[in-house]
Structure formats: structure tokens, C-alpha cells
Image: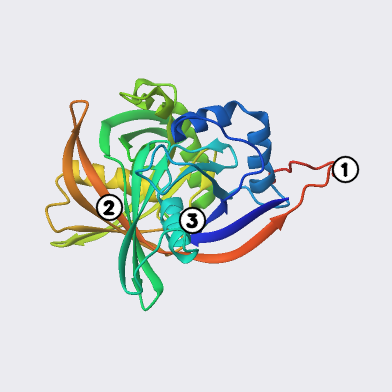
């Protein structure tokens, strides 16, 4: 029996498992992720929850685990159909709402509270805002984010294209969709998925995919396609879709992807003080992003990103696994 509470953040699902029925040992969340990847029982649990008939090819969720120390309220292992993520902004926003709505973290009737969460890429904060006992918004303060490389050539089935590689808790390739004659619209989603996979896998084994200080964070997580919708003195307006893992599609504007995009825009001089990124998704939902500050990471200029969004509870489940069921742990049929 597996009990879950489900949310969506900007349309992207997040399935929370508070008491995973299999052990996930480790001294830190980063260690727990590495061991989970190697543990067939944890992988089977992940597969049960994100595969059909209990999930689907674009399912996403997290196992709640102890934090690294008393400085955080909880830890989490993020998972998807292909494995375990290093970071997840939309999941962090959902966890912030869940922690307050369940009373795990006390919050004022009207006001704000910080929910501190240890994730594999570091410690992040979900600043949860309430009004009249209702959560109305969450600011996700991410890990320092930076540009890894610009003008990186990638050969695709449609020819060579130039991309920017950036880190926002995970490593992404990012590029304007019109460079390959596309747009970030549902009608072009099949092409965006196929070419996004090509770009990710072309870069995944290169030096651009290497994290400078933690090899556990190495690897290109996905491709972010962008449409520029204009800007003015106080706002940059873009629409994006992130194709991550092996062809999975983020319905939200992608939290860690928005952190990476903030780093790219800041490096290009498009985010002077007071400027906000309005980041729309392929389904029409919106995050807003700002740069809180600038730091140095291993000799690289980086930004401290903040992404604001909202998550909503969609239901609760009690899943059962029949030992005689021949389709356990499930299947993915796209």
C-alpha cells in the first residue's frame, strides 16, 4: 500500500509520498539519491508510481526523506519516469504549499513563512505566502545558477544549431525555438520533444555536461525551448517548454529551468535591477522570476534566483500492488 498526496504546479503534476514503504538510507539527500538510483526496490517503487496504470509518461513526484541537518524542515528525492532529478522548482513550490496546508510547518493566518528543503543539488527555500489562512503564492529561492557555455554547436536531424548551456540546479541546453523553425505551441510539441531529445543526448557526454564541483550533478537534464514575447523596462516576457529526462514534457514553466534562464538573461544584460522575467508555459501557466543577488561559484559568476508560482492539491491516493499482477511495476505507452 502506497499513500500519496498529489498537487499540480502550473499544470505539472507532483505526487508526494510522505512515508515511502522501502528504506532510502544515506547521511545526506544527495547520498540518498545516489543510493536510490542503485537500489532496485526504490526504482521499482518509483516505476509503480509514475508508470501506467497508476501514472503516465509525464508523471512526476517526490519521496519525502529526512533533511541533511536541523537547518531544514525536510528532504526530498525527486523522481520521474526515467529516474531521479537533482532539482525541481515546481516540486519545491508544491512541497511548500503541502508543508503549510498540512501543518507540518506552522504559518501565520496572513503573512509568510519559509519552508527549507534539502534537495540533491543543495538547500532551497519555499517562501509561502498566506492571506486569510489560504496559500496564495510561493517564492522558490533556488541554488546559485550560472551560464556554463554559450554558442555551443549541436548537430540535429534538422542541421546544426547553436545553444547555450546553463545550470539552475540541473544542467540545461537552451535555445530559441525559431532557430529550428519551431514555436513553443502544443501543435509543435512532437517536434519539440524529438529535437529536444537529440540536443540533450548530443551534449550529455561532453565537457559542457560536467558539474564543476559535484560529479553527482553531472549530465544534461533537458532542453529548454524559448519564444521571446517582447520586453520593456521592467519585464522580459518569454514562453518556454522544457523537454527533460528522456522526452518528458514539463507542463509548467519549469522551476529549475527558469533559474537557468534567469542566469542566461542576466549574463546577456537583459535583467537589470528591478526587472522581472514573466515565464509562460506551453499550457498557458506562468511563473515570475527575479535575480536576488550575484555570487561567485568556483570562479564563475552566478545569480541567486527566485521563482514565484503556486501549487494546488488535486487529490489523494492509496495505491495497492497486487503480487499476482503481471503488469507490476507498470509500463509507459506514449
Q: Position of residue 293 (x, y in %)?
A: 17, 46
| Residue at point 48%, 33% (across, down) | 198
Q: Is residue 176 visible?
A: no
Q: Quadrant of residue 130?
A: bottom left
On the image, the x and y values in percent for residue 244 come to 48, 41
Q: What residue is shown at x 44% (from left), y 37% (from top)?
A: 86
Examine the rendered structure and indicate whether residue 286 appears above or below residue 171: below
The answer to whether marks 2 and 1 mark residues whose Cβ atoms lie closer than 8 Å is no
Tell us which disc is closer to us: 2 or 3. 2
Residue with the mark numbered 3? 251
Q: Secondary structure at mark 2?
A: strand
Of callouts 3 and 1, the N-terminal one: 3
User: Does residue 166 appear in this view?
Assistant: yes
Q: Position of residue 193 (x, y in %)?
A: 51, 44
The image shows a total of numbered marks equal to 3
Question: Which numbered tag is attached to residue 306?
Answer: 2
Distance between mark 3 and mark 1 Cα atoms:
35 Å
* Figure quadrant of residue 30: top left
Instruction: Give neighbour class at mark 3: few <14, some 14-19, many 20+ (Cα, 10 Å).
Output: many
Secondary structure under tag 3 reads loop
Circles 3 and 1 in contact, beta carbons < 8 Å: no
Distance from disc 2 to disc 1, alpha carbons, whole Å, reads: 47 Å
Which residue in the structure is indicated by mark 1?
324
| Left or right: where 24 falls relative to 160 | right
Q: CA distance from mark 2 to mark 3?
A: 19 Å
Secondary structure at badge 1 equals loop
Q: Residues within 10 Å of mark 1 (few under 14, many from 20)?
A: few
Task: Pick the residue in front: 260 or 134.
Answer: 134
Identify the residue at horizontal 63%, vertical 41% (top origin).
46
Q: Residues within 10 Å of mark 2 (few under 14, many from 20)?
A: many
Q: Nearer the viewer, residue 6 or 283?
A: 6
Left or right position of 20 against 105? right
Amino acid at each position: 500500500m502506497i499513500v500519496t498526496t498529489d498537487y499540480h504546479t502550473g499544470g505539472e503534476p507532483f505526487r508526494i509520498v510522505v512515508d515511502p514503504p522501502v528504506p532510502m538510507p544515506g547521511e545526506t539527500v544527495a547520498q540518498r539519491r545516489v543510493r536510490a538510483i542503485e537500489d532496485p526496490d526504490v526504482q521499482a517503487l518509483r516505476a509503480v508510481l509514475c508508470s501506467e496504470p497508476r501514472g503516465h509518461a509525464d508523471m512526476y513526484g517526490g519521496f519525502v526523506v529526512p533533511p541533511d541537518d536541523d537547518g531544514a524542515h525536510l528532504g526530498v528525492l525527486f523522481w520521474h519516469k526515467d529516474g531521479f532529478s537533482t532539482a525541481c522548482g515546481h516540486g519545491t513550490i508544491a512541497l511548500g504549499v503541502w508543508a503549510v496546508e498540512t501543518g507540518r510547518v506552522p504559518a501565520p493566518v496572513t503573512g509568510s513563512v519559509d519552508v527549507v528543503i534539502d534537495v540533491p543539488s543543495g538547500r532551497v527555500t519555499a517562501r509561502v505566502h498566506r492571506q486569510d489562512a489560504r496559500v496564495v503564492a510561493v517564492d522558490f529561492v533556488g541554488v546559485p545558477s550560472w551560464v556554463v557555455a554559450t554558442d555551443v554547436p549541436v548537430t540535429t536531424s534538422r542541421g546544426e544549431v547553436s545553444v547555450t548551456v546553463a545550470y539552475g540546479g540541473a544542467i540545461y541546453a537552451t535555445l530559441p525555438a525559431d532557430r529550428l523553425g519551431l514555436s513553443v505551441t502544443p501543435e509543435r510539441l512532437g517536434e519539440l520533444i524529438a529535437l529536444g531529445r537529440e540536443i540533450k543526448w548530443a551534449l550529455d557526454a561532453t565537457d559542457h555536461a560536467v558539474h564543476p564541483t559535484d560529479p553527482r550533478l553531472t549530465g544534461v537534464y533537458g532542453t529548454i525551448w524559448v519564444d521571446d514575447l517582447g520586453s520593456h523596462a521592467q519585464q522580459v516576457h518569454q514562453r518556454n517548454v522544457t523537454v527533460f529526462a528522456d522526452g518528458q514534457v514539463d507542463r509548467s514553466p519549469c522551476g529549475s529551468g527558469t533559474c537557468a534562464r534567469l542566469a542566461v538573461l542576466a549574463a546577456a544584460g537583459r535583467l537589470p535591477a528591478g526587472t522581472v522575467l514573466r515565464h509562460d508555459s506551453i499550457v498557458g501557466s506562468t511563473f515570475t522570476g527575479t535575480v536576488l543577488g550575484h555570487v561567485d561559484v568556483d570562479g564563475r559568476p552566478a545569480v541567486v534566483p527566485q521563482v514565484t508560482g503556486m501549487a494546488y492539491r488535486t487529490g489523494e491516493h492509496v495505491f495497492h500492488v497486487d503480487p499476482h499482477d503481471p503488469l507490476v511495476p507498470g509500463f509507459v505507452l506514449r
